[in-house]
Image (spheres, helix red, strand yellow):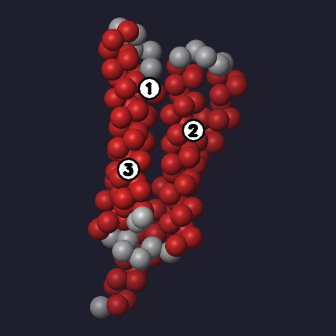
Amino acid sequence: MNYDRKFLLWALGFAVFGLCVGIYMAASKNHGQLVAHAHILLVGFVVSFIYAIIHKLWLTTPGRWIARIQFWLHIVCAALLSIGLLLLYGHVYPETVLEPILSLGSIGVLLGMLLMGVMVLRSSRAGTSAT
């Protein structure tokens, strides 16, 4: 399975997850999870969907190892960030306990974005040198 399809499937999974959190907030009339809800939809759904589009349109032959690392780094860290924020804003664990998890998730998502940038730069260089 190509990374465009993998990212698309995960994006849709994050969308369902984020929408379920939103429906829960509406039904309970408790909007305390608004930050978690927004991060799930933006980092999980939107960014993953954008990565799917980038892979489909621009990264026809990304480096196999860098694409694999970038994919798993983004998915795992987006999930860590999402779950960590749900636990934080749900007052399940104190911030002192969740801070390392949230930090790891945030830095991992950033590193995933940087790796995507590297793949895009390599792809555009390869495309311009071939013409």
Q: Residue at x 31, y 59 (%)?
A: 53
Q: Which mark is residue 9?
A: 3
Which residue is labeled 2 in the image?
A: 80
Q: Amino acid at mark 1?
A: Val
Residue 70 location in percent, x, y? Answer: 52, 60
Please name whichever residue, 6 or 43, is drawn nearer the observer in this view of the structure: 6
Q: Along the polypeptide, which appears first: circle 1 or circle 3?
A: 3
Q: Residues within 10 Å of mark 1 (few under 14, many from 20)?
A: some
Residue 27 location in percent, x, y? Answer: 33, 11
Q: Residue at x 37, y 61 (%)?
A: 4
Q: Along the polypeptide, which appears first: circle 1 or circle 2?
A: 1
Kindly report which numbered mark, 1 or 3, lies closer to the viewer in this rendering.
Answer: 3
Q: Amino acid at mark 3?
A: Leu
Task: State which quarter of the image contains the C terminus.
Answer: bottom left
For residue 109, above or below residue 117: above
The quarter holding residue 95 reads: top right
Q: Along the polypeptide, which appears first: circle 2 or circle 3?
A: 3
Kindly report which numbered mark, 1 or 2, lies closer to the viewer in this rendering.
Answer: 2
Mark-to-mark CA distance, 1 and 3: 23 Å
Q: Residues within 10 Å of mark 3 (few under 14, many from 20)?
A: some
Residue 25 location in percent, x, y? Answer: 37, 16
Q: Taking 48 as reference, is 86 left or right?
A: right
Mark-to-mark CA distance, 1 and 2: 14 Å
